[in-house]
Image (cartoon, coloured by chain):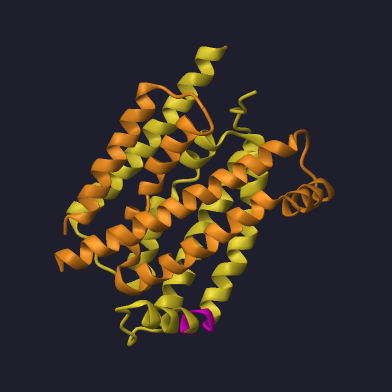
């Protein structure tokens, strides 16, 4: 009943979803940055902010990418378990900070990189535990 | 600054929670289709059409929209690299939901990995 076998095709779909996922967050950040002067303090200013962001082309580029990722992700989830798919789709945890530094000129401290690496280590352990379960079943 | 950080983390956990609920509805809808076999364009479109007529997919969609709105507010006040790293807390929600709602089985190694994620998020939030 459990679906665990990660084929090359599924792996390629997961890599594509990683790259597109990074693009989504880049677009969304760009969309949110375009409204830089707007200070959100309460619900009404939040609505004004969201109205402004939803008129940004970056947001719509992001949403279009979301639709593509949704299609890819639906296909992946029909083939393998959520608990196997999610960990492998996680290399965007490295991709997003790298894109943040290169394209958005954000600063990342050593401590934060350590945190990012710990998160990635956690994700890899989670992936390994899925593999371990597969071997036990054989 | 510290209060601001706590509010940002709270908003990120809200968006993560909405995202987890969205994924659960989506996974449950996909499982109910029993879609197996080979990929091809016709089958993928048929699959997506069958999905779109499931009410659970629309519930999933509603939670995505809520999650997106909160996420955009988070991005307006935090660096992308911090927000995205902290958003990994959805793994913790997904781990708990996979285990207790979808009844997927996993080992102690899986829990150790989830624990590392928690420590990682704390480190990312420290500066």
Quadrant that contains the C terminus of chain B: bottom left
Percent position of residue B93, x then y: 40, 43
Quadrant that contains the N terminus of chain B: bottom left
Q: Residue at x 22, y 55 (%)?
A: B125
Task: Decide whether the magenta segment is chiefly helix, strand or loop.
Answer: helix
Between B47 and B51, the one nearer to me in the picture: B51
Residue extending furthest toward the right: B42
Q: Residue at x 29, y 69 (%)?
A: A106
- Report the side of A18 relative to A42 (left or right): right
Residue A57 falls in image quadrant: bottom right
- How many numbered markers are drawn? 0
**Does the segment drawn in magenta span residue B114?**
no
Between A116 and B96, the one nearer to me in the picture: B96
Q: Residue at x 53, y 58 (%)?
A: B63
Q: Can residue A9 be seen here? A: no
Percent position of residue B106, x then y: 45, 24
Percent position of residue A137, x then y: 55, 13
- Report the side of B126 relative to B65 (left or right): left
**Does the segment drawn in magenta span residue A54?**
yes
Q: Residue at x 30, y 67 (%)?
A: B79
Q: Is residue B109 above or below residue A18?
A: above
- Report the side of A84 relative to A108 (left or right): right
Which of the chains is yellow?
Answer: A
Q: Can residue A67 be seen here? A: yes
Residues rendered magenta in the picture: A52-56
Q: Is residue B63 above or below residue A63?
A: above
Which of the chains is orange?
Answer: B
């Amino acid at each position: 009943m459990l679906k665990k076998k990660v084929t090359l095709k599924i792996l390629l779909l997961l890599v594509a979803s990683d790259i597109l996922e990074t693009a989504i967050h880049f677009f969304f950040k760009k969309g949110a940055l375009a409204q830089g002067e707007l200070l959100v303090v309460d619900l009404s200013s939040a609505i004004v902010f969201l109205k402004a962001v939803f008129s940004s082309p970056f947001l719509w580029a992001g949403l279009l990418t979301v639709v593509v990722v949704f299609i890819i992700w639906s296909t992946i989830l029909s083939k393998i378990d959520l608990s196997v798919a999610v960990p492998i789709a996680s290399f965007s945890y490295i991709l997003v900070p790298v894109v943040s530094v290169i394209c958005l000129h954000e600063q990342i401290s050593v401590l934060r990189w350590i945190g990012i690496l710990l998160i990635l280590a956690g994700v890899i352990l989670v992936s390994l535990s899925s593999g371990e379960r597969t071997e036990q079943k054989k | 600054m510290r209060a601001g950080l706590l509010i940002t983390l709270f908003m990120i956990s809200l968006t993560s929670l909405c995202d987890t609920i969205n994924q659960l509805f989506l996974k449950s809808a996909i499982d109910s289709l029993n879609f197996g076999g080979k990929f091809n364009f016709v089958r993928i479109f048929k699959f997506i059409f069958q999905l779109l007529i499931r009410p659970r997919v629309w519930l999933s969609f509603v939670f995505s929209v809520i999650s997106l709105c909160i996420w955009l507010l988070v991005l307006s006040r935090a660096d992308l690299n911090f927000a995205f790293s902290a958003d990994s807390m959805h793994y913790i929600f997904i781990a708990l939901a996979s285990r207790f709602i979808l009844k997927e089985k996993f080992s102690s190694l899986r829990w150790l990995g989830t624990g590392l994620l928690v420590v990682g998020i704390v480190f990312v939030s420290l500066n």
